[in-house]
Amino acid sequence: DAGVIQSPRHEVTEMGQEVTLRCKPISGHDYLFWYRQTMMRGLELLIYFNNNVPIDDSGMPEDRFSAKMPNASFSTLKIQPSEPRDSAVYFCASSRSGGRRNEQFFGPGTRLTVL
Amino acid sequence: AQSVAQPEDQVNVAEGNPLTVKCTYSVSGNPYLFWYVQYPNRGLQFLLKYITGDNLVKGSYGFEAEFNKSQTSFHLKKPSALVSDSALYFCAVRDEYNFNKFYFGSGTKLNVKP
C-alpha cells in the first residue's frame, strides 16, 4: 500500500491567493482527518470525515477554510483567501473504523508558506 | 476533557544509553494511548499503543512503553538508543466519547548523540 498521499509537498503563495491541498487516503479506510502543525500550537485537528461526510469541523479556524471529500479516495482542503498566519504544515491522516483499537496513518504533509 | 502532557521539550541521550520520553495523561475513564514519531520533513508514524492488557507495550524499532495507572503515565522507552532515533515524538490519547478524535501532546525532541 502506498500509504496516505498528499500533494503538493510544498506550496509557496502570496497573501490573498487561493490554496488547495490534496489528499488520497489509504484504500479501505473510511475516516479521513486534516491536521495543522505549527510551532506555536502544535498539532491541531481541523476537520474529519467518515464515509465522505464531514463529521466534525469544529477545528476549522475560520470561514476562509473549507474541506471536501467528493469520493472515498480524494479530499481537498482549501484556503481562500490565504494569509501569512496560515503558514504551517498540513497533514492528512486516515483510519479504518473499528472502535478504540485503530490508529491513524499520516501522510507526509504539505508545507504551506504564505508570503 | 482528555489530554496528554509531555513535560520535556527536548531529551538528550548518548548512543547506546537507555532513553525515556515522558507522557502523562488525563482521562475520566479508560485511557487509550498512542505514541507516534515524526522524522524531519515526514508525517507522523505510529509506534505503539495501549488499549488494554499488559502494562508493558512493545512497538516498532525496539521501542516500548510502560502504562502506569496510578501515576497516569505512559512513558516511551528504549534500552539502547541509536543516532537514527533522533526525531520528534508525540504522545496521544483517544477521545473517550468520540473514538475518532485524538489529542496529541506538544511533542518531545529526542537528540541521540554519537
Image: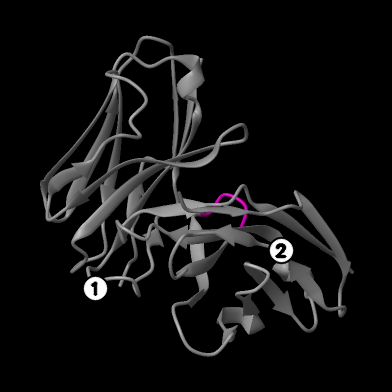
The image's colour scheme reads one colour
C-alpha distance separating marks 2 and 1:
28 Å
Residue wearing tag 2:
B22
Give above or below for B65 relative to A48. Answer: below
Q: Residue furthest bottom?
A: B54
- Where is residue A9 drawn, in percent x and y? 43, 42
At 22% from the left and 65% from the top, the residue drawn is: A29
At 76% from the left and 52% from the top, the residue drawn is: B8
Is residue B58 among what the camera can see? yes
Left or right, residue A50 beside residue A20: left
Q: Residue furthest top?
A: A16
Question: What is the quadrant of residue A54 in the picture?
Answer: top left
Give above or below for B92 relative to B54. Answer: above
At 73% from the left and 63% from the top, the residue drawn is: B86
Left or right, residue B73 beside residue A26: right
Q: Secondary structure at mark 1?
A: loop
Q: Secondary structure at mark 2?
A: loop
Left or right, residue A24 beside residue B112: left
Would you say the magenta stretch is mainly helix, strand or loop? loop
Image mark 1: chain: A
Identify which residue, B56 or A30, lies in the foreground: B56
- Where is residue A1 drawn, in percent x and y? 30, 73
- Where is residue A89 drawn, in percent x and y? 49, 38
Residue wearing tag 1:
A98
